[in-house]
Amino acid sequence: QVQLVESGGGSVQPGGSLTLSCAASGVTNNNYLLSWYRQAPGDSRVRVATIGPSPGGGTYDADSVKGRFTISIDPAKTIAYLQMNNRQPEDTAVYYCTRTKGNNIDADYWGQGTQVTVSS
């Protein structure tokens, strides 16, 4: 079974940096996509970034994070990272790690989510 375990959430000040990690188990070896989503209070879930098992890859699905966030993968450990620089208050949300289906659209497994708060 697929299991996704997130860590690294917390509170940061505006302009600060934070890195989230997602340890994935049960995914198909060398044939998977992992995505980060976020959901702000009162808002819907939005996909932020997606990466497969190839280091150096990755795509960014939200214009607001381009240039500030970096997604990366450790394929040996099956851990996806989301490095978030220059955090802004609008980045406050619950961040989820997911496995994305082969259609690269829908997620079929979700982590528990981790809260990230950006405030003074």
Image (spheres, rainbow, N blue to C red):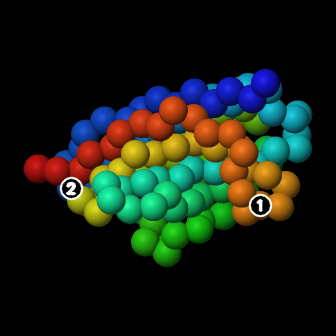
Residue tagged by mark 2?
A: 14
Q: Decide which of 20, 112 is in the foreground and name it.
A: 112
Residue 116 falls in image quadrant: top left
Where residue 115 appears, as percent x and y from the top left, is 36, 39
Where residue 73 appears, as percent x and y from the top left, is 67, 42
Where residue 92 appears, as percent x and y from the top left, is 30, 53
Q: Is residue 114 left or right of residue 80?
A: left
Q: Is residue 49 left or right of residue 45?
A: right
Secondary structure of the residue carrying numbered label 2: loop
Question: On screen, 114 above or below 86?
Answer: above
Residue tagged by mark 1?
A: 104
Residue at 47% from the left image edge and 37% from the top image edge: 113
Residue 89 visible from this viewpoint: yes
Q: Is residue 118 left or right of residue 56?
A: left
Question: Which of the labelled discs sits on residue 79, or is there none?
Answer: none
Question: What's under tag 2, amino acid-wise?
Answer: Pro
Residue 73 visible from this viewpoint: no
How far apart marks 1 and 2 lie (CA) works out to 32 Å
Rendered-image quadrant of the N terminus: top right
Secondary structure of the residue carrying numbered label 1: loop
